[in-house]
Image: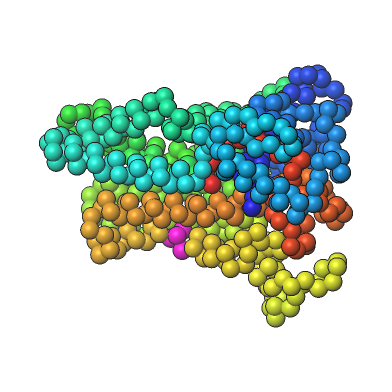
Amino acid sequence: GIDYHYVLNLDLVKEKEREAAKAGNNGAGGNSTNGTSTNGEGNDQPVTASMEMTAVSGRGSPINTPEEDKWSDEATVASDQSDLTKRRHRKTRSEDNPTCLPSTEEGKHAVPYEGAVGEITATKLLYLSASLLLLLHTTTIVWIDVLNGTTMGAIFAFYSAVTVAIVIPCQQNLWIRKSCVTVLQRAAELLNPRCSCVIVSPDGPRPVPFIDVFFADAMCSLSKVFFDWGMLWHLASHYPDPVPPSTHAIIIPSLCASLPYVIRARQCLVMHTVGRLKSDPKRYLHLVNAVKYSTSLFPLCVSAYQKTVSEETAASLEYLLVTLLTINSLYSLAWDIVMDWGMMQNPTAVLEHAGCVPLPTSSGVSGKSCAHAALRHRLRFGVLSSVTILVLDAILRFSWLLRYRESVLFPNADAYVLCTQFLEAFRRAIWNLLRVEWENIKQMKAKNGPKGSPVKKGSGVIDEEEEGLPFIAPKSNSISGTRSNTMSLA
């Protein structure tokens, strides 16, 4: 499958390489870059050979420069099938002895591997989510029903219990502490100016890496969480008295809910500035993307305003709210399909292959269906799974329609909120699959060079016209040394 650590961290590693080369060589020509091309989706795609990421030779070891680590087809690039066999072999050895780091060299003794305990996996995240839900339910019952406490007290009891469980120094929660540190680091990077729209720093503009784009997109799915944090601040500021009805009581939580969209729109403006300074002809796509995130702010403003007026006025604004939500959903869905997933970029392809005739390739006739022509030639998850994800994303983009059947489908407002948040988390999860897949394809295209360049077999570079090859990151570009710094959002 896809090496998510490679895809998420590639831009960061290349940025560190550029900074190290600039600091070590004082702008020497051997490590200078000829330019990058922004792709309209928040990250740059370097196109020079000196920007290629080289192998990391161990945990915590520095990244070798191209001069120190020459790539050799015989020594560092194996065939795709051989690479998969070695991956399975290393995985089997690590499962047999999970406390040791698997070695590919015969006769080399295994060394302690803390990642076996502190590694972040999907299974651990699922267990953590279930445990937090159980803890929240238990805390609420004990604090309110048994101890006759208040809702505010139950909330603080829950957060206190979670904090204690995280800071306890033990190996079992090491991965949680690592996750918290990584999240805080990425959140701090969201405030990094990187470049100014007016004044250009001496170091030049710094494009937003893909991992920060990925992180900010995930925050947009947590808008309701930010709203709750804003409301929690209001409750705490008036505790133990109830929050008095006022305009700021709803405006401040709504501003908190809009924060992820503002951050993501700001990233788009930063990338537009980078594209303008580098004369990128596609820089306008960043502005189009920023407009998309701005369409999420208008429904928030109308919804917040509805809570500050009479019921009659609020009802009259309902049609406006539905219109704004529909525009945002359709806009976001179109951007998901075309830009975030790289699908349906050729609208005439469906008409050209309406009879589902196999597509001609340079080597003959392939067995690709018209679905490949309509979506894209390379579908890592297959036609059925990709179409299923696309349809589910389209449906869940309109999950806000459930608010008009809330009294019929849900016993109370809390059940409605919990259901819609689960649906959004599921939508974001399946969205991530195709998003990372498309990012990996673009990274491999950037490594391979312009379209039409010959692809050497076993090079690890993905050719969209090539069938039957495993979809993996190139072995020579492994970034296992930065694995502990990767946020496992996917």
The colour style of the image is rainbow
In the depicted view, which residue is nearer to us: 379 or 112?
Answer: 112
Q: For this rendering, which residue is in front, 7 or 126?
A: 126
- Residue at 85 percent across and 34 percent down: it is 70
Q: Position of residue 476 (x, y in %)?
A: 76, 40
Towards the viewer: 137 or 195: 137
Magenta residues, dominant SS class? helix
Q: Is residue 107 left or right of residue 262?
A: right
Whether 396 is drawn above or below 254: the answer is below
* Residue 155 point in image, percent of width and height: 26, 35
**For the view shown, which residue lies furthest in the bottom direction?**
355
The image quadrant of residue 146 is: top left
Q: Is residue 239 visible?
A: yes
Q: Position of residue 363 (x, y in %)?
A: 86, 68
Res 198 seen here: no
Q: Which residues are magenta?
A: 394-398
Residue furthest toward the front?
Answer: 107
Tell whether position 396 is magenta. Answer: yes
Residue 180, image x, y percentages: 47, 31
Is residue 49 shown left or right of residue 328? Answer: right
